[in-house]
Structure formats: C-alpha cells, structure tokens
Image: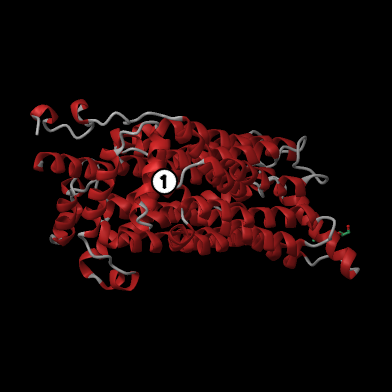
Amino acid sequence: MSSSLGNSRDHLSPDNAPPSRGKITGYLSVAVFSAVMGSVQFGYNTGVINAPEKKIKDFMNESHTYRYDTPIDENTQLNLYSLLVAIFAVGGMLGGLMAGWWADFFGRKFGMLLNNAFAFAAGGLFFFSREAHSYEMIIVARLLIGFNCGLYTGLTPLYLTEIATADIRGALGTLHQFGVTIGIFLSQILGFPEIFGNGEYWHILLGLCVAPSALQVFTMPFCPESPRYLLLTKEKENDALNALVKLRGTSGVDDDLNEMRQEHQAMQSEKKIGILHLLKKKSLRMPLVISIVMHLSQQLSGINAIFYYSFKLFTSAGISDDLAAHATSGIGGIMLVMTLITIPLMDRIGRRTLHLTGLAGMFVFSILITITLSFTDKVPWFDTANVVVSLVYVVFFAMGPGSIPWMIVAELFTQGPRVSAMSISVLINWACNFAVGYVFPIMQKELNNFSFLPFTAFLLLFWIFIYVYLPETKNRTFEDIASSWNKSQSEAGNPQAKYIPTEDTAIVEFQQQQRSNR
Ligand SMILES: *[C@@H]1O[C@H](CO)[C@@H](O)[C@H](O)[C@H]1NC(C)=O
C-alpha cells in the first residue's frame, strides 16, 4: 500500500480512488431530491399547527355547537387540542420503530413510495374536516401523518447514506436535517394570516402535506433502488450493478461493489444484540444511559413547546396575532441558517462542545423567556424582548441539541448493539415529544408565565450530566471506544480521555486497512 496515505484519515488517496468518486450525476440528484421530500414532510408537520391554533380551537367549538347544540367545554377543548398536536408523536413513534422492518420488507424505494398513501389519506381528512364539522378527522389525520413522518425519519437517512459514495456520505446525511428545517420554515411562511393561517384556509394549510408527497410520487419512480439493499438484502447482483451504474454515471463500479461486500462482511463479524439483551448488558450501560440522556436533553429542553406553541407564547407576552405569526417564521428561518452554519462545524469543533454550548445557551435564554413573560405588564418593550430571546433560544438549539443526539447514538455503539440502541433512543425521543406536546398547554394554563421553568430545570440537570459523562467523538476508533466503556468509572470524570470513532472515520479506516492488506 502506498505510503502517500500516511496518517491522514480525512480523504482517500487519489491514486486509489475509483473514477466514480464524488460525482453528482443526474440520477443521484433526482434521488436525493425525491428522498429529501420525506424530510420536508416531517418538518412541515412539526411546524404547521403552530399558527392556526386559535382557528382550529374555534373550529372545534363551532363543530361542537353545530353537532350538539352546545358550545364546547373549555377543558375538553384544551385536552382535545393538545391531543391533536401531540398524537403526531404517537404516530411518529410507531413509524420510527417500524422503519427498519419496513425498509427491508418493501425495499427503500417502494417503501418510500408506499408511505405516501398515509400522507394522501391524512391530507384528505385535513381538507374535508371543515366541511364535515369533524375535529376527530383532524386528530386521526395527525396520527396518520405522524406515522408517515416516523417512517421517513428511518427511511430517508437510510436511503441517502446508501446511495452515496463514502466520500460524500456525511454531506448527504446532513441533507435530511436540512430538509426538515426547510419543511418547518415553509409551514410557518404558509401559516401567515395573509396566506393560509386564517379562519378561512387553515384546513388547506394542514392539507398541503400532500404537496411533498406528490413531488416524491412523481420523482421516485425514476430513481434507482438502493444498490446496497439490492446486493446485500436481496442478493440481486445484476440489479445492484444497474442501479450503481445509473447513480455513478459510469460502468466502472466494481470498486463500489467490492467495497459494499467488504463493509458488509465487517459488519457481519459482530453478532447483533437485541433490545432486551442490550438493556441487561452491564458493559454497555454507560453508552446507553448517555444516549438516552442526549435524547431527553433534546426533547425536554422545551424546544417543541416553541415549535408547536410559540404563536400562543408570543401572543400571551402581548404581541399581536399578526406579528406573532410573522415572528414564528423567524424560528424556521433561524433553524435553516443555523443548520447551514453548523454542518461544517460539526467535525471541526466536535459534538461534545457544540451540544454543551447549545444546552447552556438554551438554559440561559429559557430563564430570560420566563423573565420577559413575567414582567410584560411593567416593562412595555418586554413583549418584543420575549420574541427576541425565544429566537436566540432556538439558535442555541440548532447549534447542537437539534441534530447531535441523532448522530451520537450511532457513534457510541459498534455494529452489534447499534440498531437496538437506536430503537430505544427513537422510542424515548418520540415519547418525550408527545409528553411536551400534550402537557405544555396544561402547563401554560396552570403555571402561567412560569410555564418554561420546568424546562430550565431539566436543561441544568442534563448539562451537568453530559458535561461529566459525554466523551468527544472526533477521530476515534471502534476498539478504543469498546474498551473505554469497560474501563473503571474513575475515568468518567475526565471525558477528554475517552476515545470514540465517527462512523465515517471508522469506514475510512476500514478501507485503508483493506488496501494495506492487498
Ligand atoms: C364557544 O363559542 C361560544 C359562542 O360563540 C362562546 O360563547 C364560547 O366562549 C366558546 N367557547 C370556547 C371554549 O371557546
């Protein structure tokens, strides 16, 4: 093996690179665009119920009056609306848990195509709920679209990483997160009162979830199935070859095929560990607890209180409805910009630093949210200040806690327990998403201006835990990580001493090893 590689782990040496490396072909672009529609769908439905909250509540009251001749009881209305918002996460949890099986059973391509049936069904229910005087239809539709989005959170990143060459795998993986923020932003723009966020058109706003699905249905049939799935799961060598030739735009794909087989063999060398086994395994308890706390820190930071309910939060600080809707779109805009800024920082600054900085900032600004909410009566400009500090709070979320928990679980585990660890994390994440979505309106009612304080307390606790236990995960190898968990807890206080790989470095290392063995 040439010594030109040296110790560099960042790139492959050019003399070894097959001709297809990193080329963005037409097929690849269409496949990426089509798949990312799933991410947009997820973002759209996360942000869409924010602005029309009051309109939908009024609609519930009107429908109730229409059907039963009495106005709706205020507590029933609050509970039903919270359910309408939060049931999305129940669907998400089910979809997230089924995604792995779905992807193998239907295939990546057909699996995604089929998933759109749920979006069209949900869209239909949203569209016609108004005419039918039925808020139940909206609740069922939220469950369906939640399931759809849960499946996408598994399918989209999987397909994106499987169609990429190793050198652009990381970049393509981040497109999922980018698509999600675009979806959130779009939902907030379309939720402006002068567009669909009003008493006349809110059902169209919700029903527009059919748009990303339509785009995917029209483009996905032209995309190749994941070559990795064809080769390794279906063992259809010819089909895999055809798909690869399309994606790479060249017939010189033998290296690609070999690489897949080799990676596959390396992965097979470790036995899969089931969820129950993982829960019982002492040596993996620490990374499991860290993974869970990372996801708790994302959801219990209160971010979904902002994504789902910021409109109400802003208006309760004294901002007008119009201004609140426009300020809410600032949240989506900030997420979008911050995602673009932090993606390149992720490997340079490191996950630990970014996540801790993000949580610390959220902690400080969650306190400021409470202060600005509490004293709007006394200090007139605090209503505007409340919007500003909420936006800065979102900046810190996007800096790390928004995406890092999803990456870190894959990085803390080797292949054997990885899938189980990710399933547990997905479950916990969606369960907390549901809890916050459901409980926050009740907290707002009971705690009034102090509704954000519980999140402040959680942020402090999680920051301390993560500061003490989370290792940095830059440029580490799998062997080091595995052994680091087995070492005595005495090292836990010195996180910098720990040693863990990113998936990409592990793959590059593996490839280097293969070459030097030739
Ligand atoms: C429902 O509508 C009626 C009549 O418009 C109104 O008096 C009542 O306050 C509303 N109830 C709620 C919970 O919004």
* Residue 459 placement (x, y as % from top left): 42, 52
Q: Position of residue 85 (x, y in %)?
A: 64, 57
Q: Is residue 395 left or right of residue 199?
A: left
Q: Is 254 situated above or below 282?
A: above
Q: Quadrant of the N terminus?
A: top left
Tell me which corner region of the image, top left, top right, bottom left or bottom right, holds residue 328. Answer: top right
Please tell me which residue lies in front, 283 or 322: 283
| Quadrant hosting ligand 1 | bottom right
Badge 1 marks a residue whose secondary structure is loop
Identify the colour scheme used.
Answer: secondary structure
Q: Is residue 278 left or right of residue 104?
A: left
Q: Position of residue 289 (x, y in %)?
A: 31, 62
Q: Name the residue under label 1.
A: 401
Q: Residue furthest front?
A: 238
Q: Name which residue lies at 40% across and 48% down.
A: 239
How many numbered tags mark residues here? 1
Quadrant in the picture for residue 461: bottom left
The residue nearer to you, when weighing 93 against 199, is 93
Return the x and y of residue 235 as percentages of the image width and height: 35, 56
Label 1: how many Cα within 10 Å (few below 14, some 14–19, many 20+): many
